[in-house]
Image: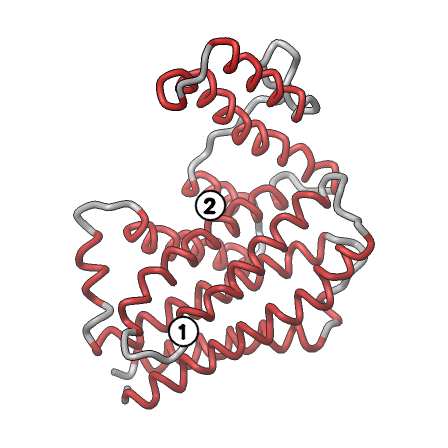
Amino acid sequence: MTDDNYREIRAQIHNYIIGFTGHVNVNYIAPINKQNDFHEEPKTFLYTVLYKVNNGLSSCQLFLTESKDYERHLDGLFLMLRTLLSDSLITNYVIRKNYTNDSDIVKNILPLYSEHLKFGLYNLRQYGKKFWKYSDIQIGEHVNKFISNYSDYINKNGTLKYKPERTTMGQKADYLITNIPEEAVQQLIIKALSLYTLFSKYEHLGMLSLPLIQRQYDKKNQLTIIREVVEAIAVIGHTIELCIKIWKQFDADIDPIFQSFINKFVTLRETLLRLELNL
């Protein structure tokens, strides 16, 4: 691959991201905001995913702009994609686990929320005095305020109303691959977990970090790296599509512009894979 080809592909991905995330903002997120229709579950969760993941994907295009130091910025791109792949795996798990209707999604959301809140309470009680120099009275005030703010999920005595579910990404992926019969979904989850695991070596410092950091400076790895980026974006795009499909007001299947962007990412990924295999 020549430098010009590499720049052209990056520019193409950059433009696709801008077009896709802009379309999602205007045609899905903005109407939800206008109607103020996200204050009950599972809409609160779905809106959080749409807003967070679409904004995160939009930010990825900043790392794909042309610059002489482009390779130095790839670490940031991989870290962003890792976060969005984590969101994608969690979202697929919450939506697809034992799904028959929206009430099943709510059942899966509650343990996720409890896991978040558990650590908020734990940090206040465990480290409030040592790290933040709170007095016992101040810790009590902060804990009571926390409990009051999230009284739908925390009892007055500080215990959680719903049991937290602590599952790893691998366990979530394993459940989905084992229990969801559609091969397309299985392949999506496998790809999400594979890339999440790869990009996690940038997130968590260790023995495998340096080889990954160094590989982006070797031109022979350019095609592989850009293919991984496109595959990650395709997974993230499908997660956005899943949230829109669950939101009964919308139908992404009959949105030709939305589907054209989904297809563009898939087609580009297939093209890059063929080029990579022919090297």
- Which of the marked residues, 1 or 2, is nearer the chain's N terminus? 1
User: Residue at (56%, 17%) from the top-left corner?
Assistant: 143
Q: Is residue 120 left or right of residue 243?
A: left
User: Residue at (40%, 23%) from the top-left corner?
Assistant: 132
Q: Is residue 238 above or below residue 275?
A: above
Give, as a three-letter code, the residue at label 1: Leu
Where is residue 181 drawn, in percent x and y?
A: 57, 51
Secondary structure found at label 1: helix
Where is residue 91 drawn, in percent x and y?
A: 57, 47
Q: Residues within 10 Å of mark 1 (few under 14, many from 20)?
A: many
Q: Residues within 10 Å of mark 2 (few under 14, many from 20)?
A: many
User: Residue at (35%, 18%) from the top-left corner?
Assistant: 130
Where is residue 119 drawn, in percent x and y?
A: 48, 26
CA separation in Å, label 1 and label 2:
29 Å
Mark 1 and mark 2 in contact? Answer it, CB < 8 Å: no
User: Residue at (20%, 45%) from the top-left corner?
Assistant: 206
Nearest to the observer: residue 35 or residue 196: 35
Q: Is residue 123 left or right of residue 251?
A: left
Secondary structure found at label 2: helix
Nearest to the observer: residue 36 or residue 234: 36
Quadrant in which residue 199 is drawn: bottom left
Residue linked to disc 2: 173
Q: Is residue 207 above or below residue 275?
A: above
Give, as a three-letter code, the residue at label 2: Ala
Residue linked to disc 1: 64
**Mark 1, mark 2: which one is toward the viewer?**
1
